Amino acid sequence: MDNQIEDISIFCIAPMARELYENNIFVLTLNSKMLYVVGGNLSNVDAVRRKISDLAKEYKMSIRQMTVKEYNDAKNSEYMEGESARIFTSLIMIILSVFGIMSISAAKLLSKRREIGIRLSFGTSKRGIIFIFSGELFILFVISLLITLLIHNISIINKSEMKKYFYNFSYGLNIQSVGVLLGIIVLIFIFSCIVPIITIKKFSLRDLIGGYE
Amino acid sequence: MKNAIIRLENISKIYGKDDYKTVALKDINLEIFEGDFVSIMGPSGSGKTTLLNIIGFIDTPTDGKYFLKGQDVNKMARGKFHKLRGTEVSFIFQQFALLKDYTAYENIQLPLLYRKMSRKEKKAKILFYAEKLGIGDILHKKPSQLSGGQQQRVAIARALASEANIILADEPTGALDQKKGNELMKILAGLNKEGKTILVVTHDPNIANYCIRNIRIEDGKIISDSSSLQDEPLKTC
């Protein structure tokens, strides 16, 4: 059906290309349900309108007539809706990631209570413990991220449409993409570290040393 | 005349609040002198470990004053206590408290991790103390591959590596049989002879006999503080 529509538009426009061009008319067949006719002064090309109207009826398509500005506004709005959805999904994913990493770090912290106590009792400061812990967490974080990117790239290897929306290694290094990616990584990492840092700050050395391995 | 390296004035420690209040230490006055070899004895719950924890900056007193080398510890920022733990006092714990995922070498290295010294210097220091304690050949092993006696020697080497002058031992023989326990106390007596100030918390009179000075604590109060009749430990290496 998509091919047919494309054929229709070519059929429709080609014989009157010059006239359409001069009158600033473009026929855009975007999907099976809507035929966009974009132009300035359509009154001069009634024949085109009739033809388009007939074709639209034949293929059970609705027609919407609009100016170039209206068309652009509509497309922008549509794009922004899609973008908002993507941003919302991304935020949800980031929040979930933060909770996931927080859970891992909390579990790791509990399993290392004794070790932290021993280190503290031999002169390591709490800041030093936070540094060691964050370092270990960061390594874990980067490994998880690389695995995720690898899986993602493998999964969309032949889906060029998706590549438009995601950073893809096969696209080469794009400074903006890499910047955004790094920014997100740093943000997730910082948020993930807040709870463990507060927990370490609150640790009582007496309680940590009290238990035995 | 010996200098009081540690002086406690009316030290009290209370855990909990209101109806759940537990008095662990009550008005403790104590002076520990440079080169002392002290045992702190008492039944379970008498407050001996709490006292050791306060001396070792693991815990803080609720009330009273603590002077270390004449300096009022209360006036120091709590954030600086870790430096004192690393340089002034060192610990030997009952269950050795070794890091199970690290080798004996790495465990001994622990107090040196944040010291400003070269890797070569650190290595030399670790090897020196390992040889001194007869564990030079097991440095590559992890605690799970070591016997109880070997683990305790690693723990002592770690305490010595910090080069702190005060060694605090909380039931150091608690996880060892009598023979190994006696060996350990002979090592500590030897270190005391070399000038280390050693405080040992124990409930075993046999272990306390190795020490020159014996302090008895009950219900959070010192009930006796007697130096042994001899200047030398009763049993030495």
Image: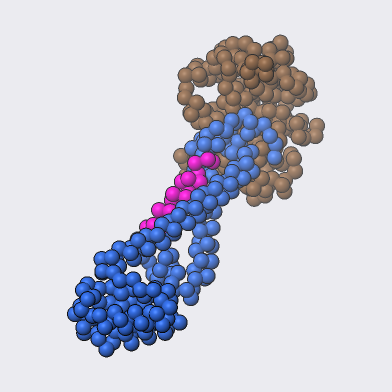
Quarter holding the N terminus of chain B is top right
In the image, the chain rendered in blue is A
Quadrant of the image occupied by residue B93: top right
Q: Position of residue B81 (x, y in %)?
A: 51, 28
Stretch of the chain drawn in magenta: A179-196
Q: Residue at x 47, y 41 (%)?
A: B117
In this view, B30 is above or below B130: above
Quadrant of the image occupied by residue B8: top right
Does residue A186 belong to the magenta stretch? Answer: yes
Quarter holding the C terminus of chain B is top right
Quadrant of the image occupied by residue B133: top right
Q: Position of residue A130 (x, y in %)?
A: 51, 41
In the image, the chain rendered in brown is B
Q: Residue at x 80, y 34 (%)?
A: B177
Residue A182, can we see it? Answer: no
Q: Is residue A104 left or right of residue A213?
A: left
Q: Is residue A183 left or right of residue B31?
A: left
> Which secondary structure type mostly characterizes the magenta part of the structure?
helix
Q: Is residue B150 left or right of residue B83?
A: right
In front of the other: A62 or B179: A62
Q: Position of residue A204 (x, y in %)?
A: 59, 30
Does residue B217 belong to the magenta stretch? Answer: no
Residue A146, can we see it? Answer: yes
